[in-house]
Amino acid sequence: MNLMKLHYKIKIDNPKTHYLSVTIRGQRSKDDAKLSFFIPSWSPGSYLMREYGKHIQNFKALNPGGEFYYFEQVDKGVYEVDFESKEVKGDKENFEIHYDVFCHELTVRTSHIDESHAFLHGPTIFMGIKDKNILNPEVEVEFPPLWSKLTTGLRDISTKREVFLYSADNYDDLIDSPIEIGCQETDGFRVDGIDHELCWYGSPMKHGYNLKADIKTIVEYISKTMGEIPYEKYTFITHFAPNLFGGLEHKNSTALQYCSRAMIDRSGYTDWLELVAHEYFHTWNVKRIRPKELGPFNYLSEGFTRMHWLTEGLTSFMDQLFVYRCGLTTLSEYLEKMKANLNRYYSIPGRKFHSLEDSSFNAWIKLYRPDENSNNSSISYYLKGGLVFFALNILLVKEGSGINALLDLLWKRYKADPENGMEDHEVYSMIESLTNRKVRERFENMICSTEEIDFEQLLKEMSVEVEYTTDSKVDLGVVTSNTGDRVVIKSVTLDGAAHKYGLNAGDEIIAIDGMRVLSGDFQKYDKFLTLNKTYRFTVSRLGYLTDVEVLMESAPRSIVALKSTNEELTKKFLG
């Protein structure tokens, strides 16, 4: 029998150590002589093998009488327990699995415990059992008495105030529900009679915005657009700390991280709102509407799909659009965001070599593992995907439709067959049904090829003109990092001056034409280097001084403004 009931107990005794202990209690079938307990290697929504097994310690398996079952680690994060161990004389049906987990990495896809709080990311904490369906798992949590709150999307089944006991429908939902424990600030609101819980760890710098009201506005607008709310309760867990950024979607919750200092700036605050909208919209797009490869999951190996242009591309377009449509940004602010998107896109040579399908399939080895050559060889399906759906929306509106009509068809498809994800041809067929075959083929070409997309012409369709830079600035074509006064090249842009003449990633720039260059000087190199002149760069490469002659070239043109020539028509295209 493949069904199994498990009770998990998490105990945090000493947060200073960053450890927690887990005890799993269950009963095996007599047919199961051995069971393989595993910790996932990756997290849905974050497509990289993170090998969470590296944080597991002190694994052991016992019966209720304290006798030890023999076990063997058979794979990364996989422990096979032999319940017919000759050493065990007593109860061989019931078992307890014990292990410790080290938690000291504060991201939305890892766990973090210190004296101030605990953030528990399910895939790093909860072991599953291979080839078993865990039915209604229960989770009991014990933590230090100085902490007063636990926030999670798990179902609260506690009967006593001092006991923190929760349940989920299955193992997938269990690990899809992050947990925040500590003295966090909590608040909430209701939309259509459904509770939405807000949880804040840390705090942003003082600002004049009403986060609760703006989040509620986003929730109301997106849920109304999608036609229904598919959960009984929703939880926003937010971490504010300097230099943080990230978000991860869950079925009825999200974990968000944002820089404490960024929100005092208007642009930084609207970026925050887009992050909220992005992760919340994933409630529909990804957690329910999804490619067929994204569920049910194999948590021990990669889940390859060529359709992240749908999961993340569509979401990246909609997050900015939703915030604009909510009235939380203006038209000029929206166009400023789109200008930034296009400039980023045009600055990435990898768009010429990597289609959206390729970008999606290779997420496991490219997007989540960037290196010095990533921008030269690949394109983000977040960035290009969002721009492609921006283009599609223009084409849809021209044909008397719009992106909302596609969202409606995607949601109806999910509702008709919620157990099975969709294939790309289904999305293409939806687009054709809303427009015509020509639009379908044009969109499909944007997904499958590396042909340049004429965004300038598409923008003209919605009465938006593109203004480019007119002055020629010197550009070396490098990204550098500074350690003190040192200037080290991190990456070299394909076909830029540095690339053409032989400067390398890893080179430390020591001098230009014999004059010492420090980080403060290099930041202003366009002020003292002249276009079409050759300069001798002295660099330290692998510990040796090397001279490289570089002819200075001009920077590629960039967009300085997107301006609407007919705001009424432009707004019509944006809905």
Image (cartoon, rainbow, N blue to C red):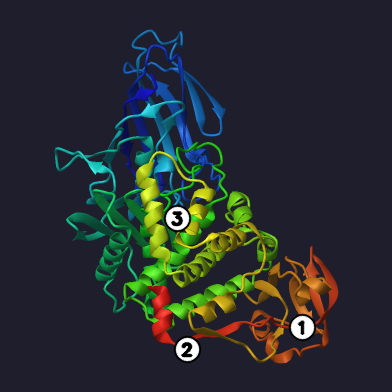
Residue at mark 2: 565
Determine crowd level at label 3: few under 14, some 14-19, many 20+ residues with C-alpha closer than 10 A. some
Name the quadrant of the C terminus.
Answer: bottom left
Q: Is residue 534 visible?
A: yes
Disc 3 residue type (three-letter): Thr
Q: Of the residues under marks 1 and 2, which one precedes in the sequence?
A: 1
Residue positioned 27% across, 53% down in the render: 229
Identify whether 500 is placed above or below 186: below
* Chain-order first, disc 1 or disc 3: 3
Give the image quarter of residue 466. bottom right
Q: Is residue 279 visible?
A: no
Viewer-nearest of labels 3 and 2? 2
Q: Which residue is mark 1?
A: 553
Name the foreground residue: 204 vs 283.
Answer: 283
From the top left corner, tell me how far across and down residue 102 is, in percent.
45, 43
User: On the image, numbered disc 3 is attached to which residue?
Assistant: 107
**Residue 230 drawn above or below residue 158:** below
Q: Secondary structure at mark 3?
A: loop
Q: Between 275 and 319, which is closer to the camera in this rendering?
A: 319
Q: Pointer 1: residues within 10 angstroms few (<14), some, or many (20+)?
A: many
Type of residue at label 1? Glu
Answer with the quarter of the image where residue 488 lies. Answer: bottom right
Front disc: 1 or 2: 2
Question: Amino acid under label 2?
Answer: Thr
